[in-house]
Image (tube, rainbow, N blue to C red):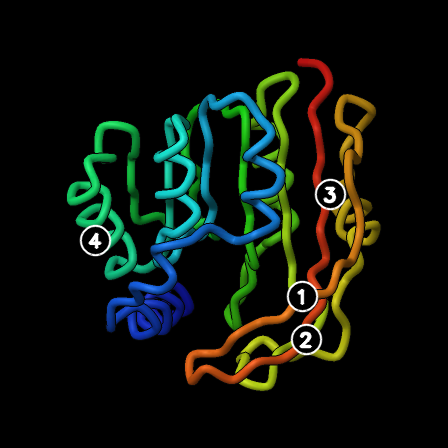
Amino acid sequence: MESTRDAASFWDEQYRVPRPAQTSRANPVLAEIAGKLTPGTALDLGCGAGGDALWLAGRGWRVTAVDISANAVRRLAENAQERGLHTAMSVVCVDLAEDFPEGSFDLVSAQYFHTPFALPRARVLRTAAHALRPGGRLVIVDHGSAAPWSWSAQSHYPTPDEVFAELALDARWRVERADMPRREATGPGGQTATVIDNVLVIRRTTA
């Protein structure tokens, strides 16, 4: 329980101040992938400031957005209401280390699903894969390197193939995309750096 309180407090502090820039755009890899899909039901794991969830809802998806931070969840619900997207979105405060949303989905998004606290990440992502409907996709975008301003620096960044192997999925799921593109990132102070994203798209082929 102490770890849960610590994690919730940490992320509440991260989202204590509104981040309008992060609610005005989706993560580019998600936008690239989801922009080619027919809208259906989507689950946003660790929705944060909510840019991805708002982008999806604005394009016809019915979105369930979850985060451990009550601040993030409250502000996203307010933003959805202001933009007239609240009827297409359910925003829930959930500690994914302890619980997982009910339902089945055409798209599950896990964008930079990292935390400095204990998290059974592989178990959460495996559960997400099982929550997909046949034909649905799990889109995982991880840090492949750290920007100078990031708290997420680590000694090893698992490759997309390593992440897929850790999920231990059977033949009902297949890798649709696994690559490590580079992009220019902009930090909170306007600084820029070239970073690597580890991209893994898993598609559920059958029930």
Q: Which residue is at a point 49% across and 78% down the rendered structure image? A: 187
- Between tags 4 and 1, which lies in front? 1
- Which comes sooner in the sequence, label 1 or label 3? 3
- Between tags 4 and 2, which lies in front? 2
- Crowding at mark 2 (Cα within 10 Å: few <14, some 14-19, many 20+): few
- Which comes sooner in the sequence, label 4 or label 2? 4
Q: Which residue is at a point 70% across and 73% down the rendered structure image? A: 145
In this rendering, position of residue 22 left or right of residue 207: left
- Kindly indicate the quadrant of the structure image that contains residue 184: bottom right
Residue 17, percent from left and from top: 24, 73
Residue on which disc 3 sits: 167
Residue 138, percent from left and from top: 62, 36
Along the line of sight, which residue is nearer the eye, 194 or 63? 194
- Crowding at mark 3 (Cα within 10 Å: few <14, some 14-19, many 20+): some
Q: Amino acid at mark 2?
A: Thr
- Which comes sooner in the sequence, label 3 or label 2? 3
Element under disc 2: strand
Q: Which residue is at a point 21% across and 53% down the rendered structure image? A: 74
Give me the C-alpha separation between circle 4 and circle 1: 31 Å
Residue 203, percent from left and from top: 70, 28
Q: Amino acid at mark 4?
A: Arg
Q: Amino acid at mark 1?
A: Arg
Give me the C-alpha separation between circle 4 and circle 3: 31 Å
- Between tags 4 and 3, which lies in front? 4
Residue on which disc 4 sits: 74
Residue on which disc 1 sits: 183
- Between tags 1 and 3, which lies in front? 1
Decide: marks 1, 2 in contact (CB < 8 A)?
yes
Q: Amino acid at mark 3?
A: Leu
Residue on which disc 2 sits: 194
Q: How many marks?
A: 4
Image quarter of the C terminus? top right
